[in-house]
Image (cartoon, rainbow, N blue to C red):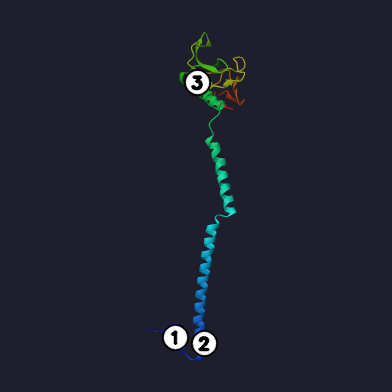
């Protein structure tokens, strides 16, 4: 079996032997240096593991968490207010009334009954005029705590639509105002001349 690198170097002439020893020694030294570097890297890694996360990493994580909370909280608490729910209810009822008027080619009337109630009446033509039938087709009540804000029959408490679904008289453009008694929040529902219902 061939000997080690040092045995082979020992059999060489003087100068060559010295050069060979240097080469062999250089390789050994390089190997030893690599081992020392590997050990130092391991020690550094162990030190980092014991030390834990850095302050910068904590700040980044905290910023991300704060951003997620800022986005999530409004979504979780985004239940509509009472006056918003009342606006949706009122809009839906008047739009349904408009659909009925067009379907029957007749007039319908929305009328505020009190500060919290309303009724929808069918109208019939008599002696060349449209008369309100006494018995309402539908009635409605606003959610608890919500009321019409100063709306009466004289100042916009009625909405009449004709058989085409248009507001009559066309220049009426009534606005129904709603108010939350507890928070004071106000919203409005407007009916345009073409009969379109617009929450404001």
First in sequence: mark 3 or mark 1?
1
Q: CA distance from mark 2 to mark 3?
A: 110 Å
The secondary structure type at the circle numbered 1 is helix
Question: Circle 3: is it few (<14), some (14-19), or many (20+) Cα within 10 Å?
Answer: many
Residue name at image x 49 percent, y 81 percent: 24
Residue at the spot of label 1: 7
Relative side of 125 to 181, left or right = left
Give percent across and percent down for residue 63: 58, 47
Q: Nearer the viewer, mark 3 or mark 1?
A: 1
Q: Which mark is residue 18?
A: 2
- Seen from the viewer's position, the closer of residues 75 and 7 is 7
- Which residue is more in the foreground, 182 or 200? 182
Q: Residues within 10 Å of mark 2 (few under 14, many from 20)?
A: some
Specify few, some or many for label 1: CA neighbours under 10 Å numbering under 14, 14-19, or 20 or more: few
Nearest to N terminus: mark 2 or mark 3: 2
Which mark is nearer the camera, 2 or 3? Answer: 2
Residue at image mark 3: 97
Spatial separation of the CA atoms under disc 2 and disc 1: 13 Å
């Amino acid at each position: 079996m061939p000997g080690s690198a040092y045995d082979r170097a020992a059999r060489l002439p003087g100068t060559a032997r010295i050069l060979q020893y240097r080469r062999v020694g250089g390789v050994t030294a390089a190997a030893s240096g690599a081992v020392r570097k590997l050990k130092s890297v391991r020690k550094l890694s162990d030190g980092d593991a014991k030390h834990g996360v850095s302050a910068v990493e904590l700040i980044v994580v905290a910023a991300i968490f704060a951003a997620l909370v800022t986005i999530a909280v409004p979504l979780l608490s985004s239940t509509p207010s009472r006056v918003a729910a009342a606006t949706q209810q009122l809009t839906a009822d008047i739009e349904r009334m408009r659909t009925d008027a067009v379907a029957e080619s007749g007039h319908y009337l929305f009328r505020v009954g009190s500060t919290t109630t309303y009724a929808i009446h069918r109208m019939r033509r008599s002696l060349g005029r449209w008369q309100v039938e006494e018995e309402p087709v539908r009635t409605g009540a606003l959610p608890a705590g919500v009321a019409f804000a100063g709306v009466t029959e004289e100042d916009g408490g009625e909405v009449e639509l004709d058989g085409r679904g248009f507001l009559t008289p066309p220049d009426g453009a009534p606005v129904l105002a709603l108010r939350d008694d507890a928070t004071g929040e106000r919203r409005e529902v407007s009916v345009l001349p073409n009969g379109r219902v617009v929450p404001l």
